[in-house]
């Protein structure tokens, strides 16, 4: 009887050990990695800046479109569809009807106006509003030529970005680069300049010499680049930005 009981007890212990070993891998398979939170883009309403004359209204639409595109590309903002706007912002509206903007779930709002001055230049003003707090967060005015409206839009986007995120914006930025074109065995390399969004692209050199390694100066008003004119002569030039005037900084054979 004792032998039978000992045998039975041994079987139970062995079975219990087997169960423990069998269940261990199933517990080890449960693994949860939390790496970061999910950032939802901020809903922001950017209606066309108000203007009286047809050219002012068109400039207001263009300004709003560029500001919206800049902020959306950052991934931190979600510009709302203008077709959802309830209030039609006009020059006379000094303060928005915040209830109308809360109804479409806007958390921030950009308003502004465009006016043509006597000398033909544009006066652009904008305000940034906190819709839920019903208060103004920022507001500036700029006077510029009509051809420079796009840079004003980038400056407005920079201010909105900085005021909401606390970090400096980067939309009023230009890129200097080497453009390549032509056949594979006859490549033409020219120094080029464009806005950070790809607009206002223009060439600074004519492509008759090989251009390499462009660099901005610390003031960003000039660019240095290497220019190979012959097989045995390489020079480093400085060129004004914007402009096409260049001067030789270093020349070596």
Image (spheres, grey):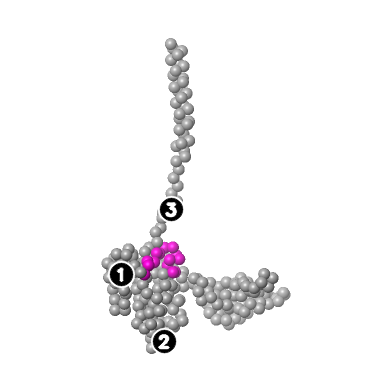
Q: Are marks 1 and 2 in contact (CB under 8 Å)?
A: no
Q: Which residues are magenta?
A: 69-82
Residue in the foreground of this view, choosing between 152 and 252: 152
First of labels 2, 3 by sequence position = 3
Residue in the foreground of this view, choosing between 89 and 32: 89
User: Looking at this rendering, what residue extends furthest in the right direction?
Assistant: 232
Quadrant of the snapshot with the N terminus: top left
Residue at 43% over, 72% down: 66
Q: Position of residue 45 (x, y in %)?
A: 36, 68
Judged from the image, the secondary structure of the residue bearing numbered disc 3 is: loop
Q: Nearer the viewer, mark 3 or mark 1?
A: 1
Q: Please indicate, yes or no, whether residue 3 appears anywhere in the rendered image.
A: yes
- Which disc, if any, is residue 205? none
Q: Is residue 189 left or right of residue 16?
A: right
Q: Is residue 197 left or right of residue 134?
A: right
Magenta span includes 80: yes
Residue at 46% over, 24% down: 15
Q: Are marks 2 and 3 in contact (CB under 8 Å)?
A: no
Residue in the foreground of this view, choosing between 129 and 165: 129
Q: Please indicate, yes or no, whether residue 250 appears anywhere in the rendered image.
A: no
Q: CA distance from mark 3 to mark 1?
A: 36 Å
Q: Is residue 104 left or right of residue 226?
A: left
Residue wearing tag 2 = 120
First of labels 3, 1 by sequence position = 3
Q: CA distance from mark 1 to mark 2?
A: 33 Å
Magenta span includes 225: no
- Using the rendered view, name the quadrant where residue 187 is placed: bottom right
Q: CA distance from mark 2 to mark 3?
A: 51 Å
Residue at 36% over, 64% down: 43
Q: Residues within 10 Å of mark 1 (few under 14, many from 20)?
A: few
- Which disc, if any, is residue 36? 3
Judged from the image, the secondary structure of the residue bearing numbered disc 2 is: loop
């Amino acid at each position: 009887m004792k032998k039978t009981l000992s045998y039975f007890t041994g079987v139970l212990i062995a079975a219990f050990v087997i169960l423990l070993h069998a269940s261990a891998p199933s517990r080890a398979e449960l693994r949860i990695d939390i790496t970061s939170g999910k950032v939802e883009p901020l809903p922001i309403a950017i209606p066309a800046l108000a203007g009286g004359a047809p050219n002012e209204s068109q400039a207001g639409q263009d300004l709003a479109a560029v500001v919206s595109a800049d902020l959306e590309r950052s991934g931190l903002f979600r510009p709302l569809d203008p077709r959802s706007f309830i209030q039609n912002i006009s020059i006379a509206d000094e303060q928005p009807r915040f209830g109308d903007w809360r109804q479409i779930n806007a958390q921030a709002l950009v308003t502004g106006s465009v006016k043509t001055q006597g000398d033909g230049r544009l006066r652009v003003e904008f305000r940034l509003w906190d819709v839920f707090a019903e208060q103004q967060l920022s507001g500036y005015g700029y006077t510029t030529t009509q051809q420079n409206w796009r840079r004003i839009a980038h400056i407005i986007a920079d201010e909105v970005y900085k005021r909401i995120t606390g970090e400096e914006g980067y939309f009023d930025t230009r890129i200097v680069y080497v453009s390549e074109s032509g056949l594979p065995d006859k490549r033409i390399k020219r120094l080029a300049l464009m806005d950070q969004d790809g607009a206002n692209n223009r060439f600074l050199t004519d492509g008759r010499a090989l251009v390499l390694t462009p660099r901005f100066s610390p003031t960003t008003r000039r660019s240095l680049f290497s220019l190979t004119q012959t097989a045995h002569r390489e020079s480093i030039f400085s060129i004004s930005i914007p402009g096409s005037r260049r001067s030789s900084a270093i020349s070596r054979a």
